[in-house]
Image (cartoon, grey):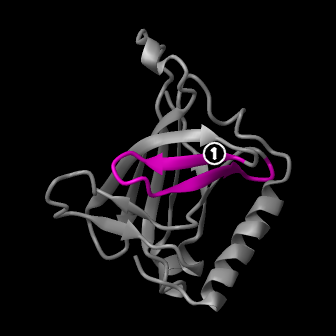
Amino acid sequence: MRKFGFKKMAAIAAIVVASAAQAGAASLDGLLGPDGAVFDKSFSADFLKKHENQQVQSIRFEQFPKVESKTDQLADVSGVDFAVTVKFRDSDKNFEAAGMCFAGEEGMNCRISCDDSGFFLKADEAGKSILLLNLEGFELNGCSDTNVNLRTLKSDPDNAVYKLDPVSQG
């Protein structure tokens, strides 16, 4: 992954702190549940033209329905299974990753299964959408032996926070 100087990391931290403040007391509890949920965001060509350093054309977060485990070893695991799909502005292909999110003090820490990179989730201020906070960058399509289609969503000020809106399931 690319290294950032102090100024860039300070800018990312400022964005994250502002997002955390914006999230306020809103909780993910009403957004994520046992039946699963889907959130996404697509950016128009005009928006991308104005934001040349943004890598993402569209991003989707899918929480899978909770399945009761009959295996004693998994009975104590209290996480949320997910998949994240990203379409980069320079590609027609969708890149994917899957893993598990675990509750924290301010939201959920989501980790990619094969490489332990990840992101954080918080509810927006209104409690109707989620904020995907890309603090460290994460890999997509990286769980194969060849890593031929590996892409990394870098963490920088233009790619640090995405507000994803709920998608109707039905």
Residue 49 image point, x, y percent: 48, 85
Q: Secondary structure at mark 1?
A: strand
User: Could you tell me if residue 64 is visible in this image?
Assistant: yes
Residue 59 image point, x, y percent: 46, 58
User: Could you tell me if residue 69 is visible in this image?
Assistant: no
Question: Residue 158 sits in which quadrant?
Answer: bottom right
**Residue depicted at 61% across the width and 27% down the height:** 33
Residue 162 image point, x, y percent: 59, 63
**Residue depicted at 53% across the width and 29% down the height:** 36
Residue nearest the observer in this picture, 167 or 123 = 123
Q: Mark 1 belongs to which amino acid?
A: Met
Give the quadrant of the N terminus: bottom left
Left-right relation of 15 to 100: right
**Residue depicted at 46% across the width and 31% down the height:** 64
Other residues around mark 1 within 10 Å, as few (<14) / some (14–19) / many (≥20):
many
In the image, residue 134 above or below residue 9: above
Q: Which residue is mark 1?
A: 108
Q: Which residues are magenta?
A: 107-126
